[in-house]
Image (cartoon, helix red, strand yellow):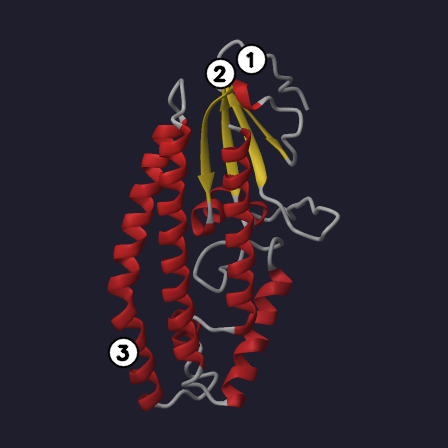
């Protein structure tokens, strides 16, 4: 169980870093089209970017559906009273494979979009992204991919000694809920079920604090855990 928990945590962290890399150097179709007048996008460029987006959107959606289904199955398997380790590891391999395909598709789409932009247009878009970043976590503005960054509160994200940002954790039991930044004191055997939120889902529900992922752990009844702040 400890091994599976570690794998799930690493999945959340790795996806957060992949998204950071994408947002730092690449540009979504939504960002480009929203600022088309500002960057003087030509009609020819706009049509090419629309085609790139539409050609990949269908396959991206199909992969996302398959990934959501695979994650749901994994969640059910992990919630069993006795976990079949061989089966869940096989299911985890499927989740990792689908996530890799999804990231590659997203990456190839964003690269193709960037290659349609001139150097000056990229500079203009970088300035737009810089403005959003400065406001992130303070005003609840819309992020680069259309989702909210924060709700007026500035989040705190713990960082390991290696400089890797970690997800936040939500501990739940008998209707009680507590947000923590470490689960070192949690016995894996006391966990009844675990839910992993990533990407826009985590940010939509937990604001800027959820940008590196959220792991919700429901404890078994009778588990002694201090929910006091």
CA distance for labels 1 and 3 = 54 Å
State the residue at coordinates (60%, 58%).
136
Q: Report crowding for label 3: few under 14, some 14 to 19, many 20 or more residues within 10 A (C-alpha).
A: few
- Disc 1 is placed on an element classified as loop
**Residue 149 appears in the rendering:** no
Disc 3 or disc 2, which is closer to the eye? Answer: 2
Q: Position of residue 215 (x, y in %)?
A: 51, 37
Q: Is residue 108 above or below residue 169?
A: below
Q: Position of residue 143 (x, y in %)?
A: 50, 61
In front here: 201 or 187?
187
- How many tags in the picture? 3
- Disc 2 is placed on an element classified as loop
**Residue 123 appears in the rendering:** yes
- Disc 3 is placed on an element classified as helix
Say the numbered circle drawn on residue 192. none
Say the numbered circle drawn on residue 220. 2
Say the numbered circle drawn on residue 223. 1
To which residue does mark 3 refer?
51
In front here: 38 or 91?
91
């Amino acid at each position: 169980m400890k091994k599976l928990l570690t794998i799930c945590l690493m999945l959340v962290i790795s996806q957060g870093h992949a998204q950071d890399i994408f947002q730092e150097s690449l540009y979504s179709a939504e960002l480009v089209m929203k600022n088309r007048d500002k960057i003087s996008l030509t009609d020819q460029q706009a049509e090419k970017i629309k085609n790139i987006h539409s050609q990949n959107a269908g396959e991206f959606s199909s992969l996302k559906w398959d990934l959501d289904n695979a994650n749901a199955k994994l969640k059910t398997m992990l919630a069993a009273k006795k976990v079949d380790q061989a089966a869940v590891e096989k299911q985890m391999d499927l989740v990792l494979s689908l996530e890799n395909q999804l990231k590659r598709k997203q990456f190839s789409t964003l690269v193709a979009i960037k290659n349609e932009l001139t150097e000056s247009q990229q500079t203009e878009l970088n300035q737009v992204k810089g403005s959003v970043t400065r406001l992130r976590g303070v005003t609840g503005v819309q992020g680069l991919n259309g989702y909210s960054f924060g709700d007026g509160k500035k989040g705190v994200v713990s960082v390991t000694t290696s400089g890797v940002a970690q997800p936040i954790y939500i501990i739940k039991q008998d209707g009680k809920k507590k947000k923590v930044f470490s689960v070192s004191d949690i016995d894996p055997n006391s966990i009844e079920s675990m839910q992993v939120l990533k990407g826009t889902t985590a940010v939509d529900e937990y604001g800027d604090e959820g940008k590196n992922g959220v792991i919700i752990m429901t404890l078994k009844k009778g588990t002694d855990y201090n929910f006091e702040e």
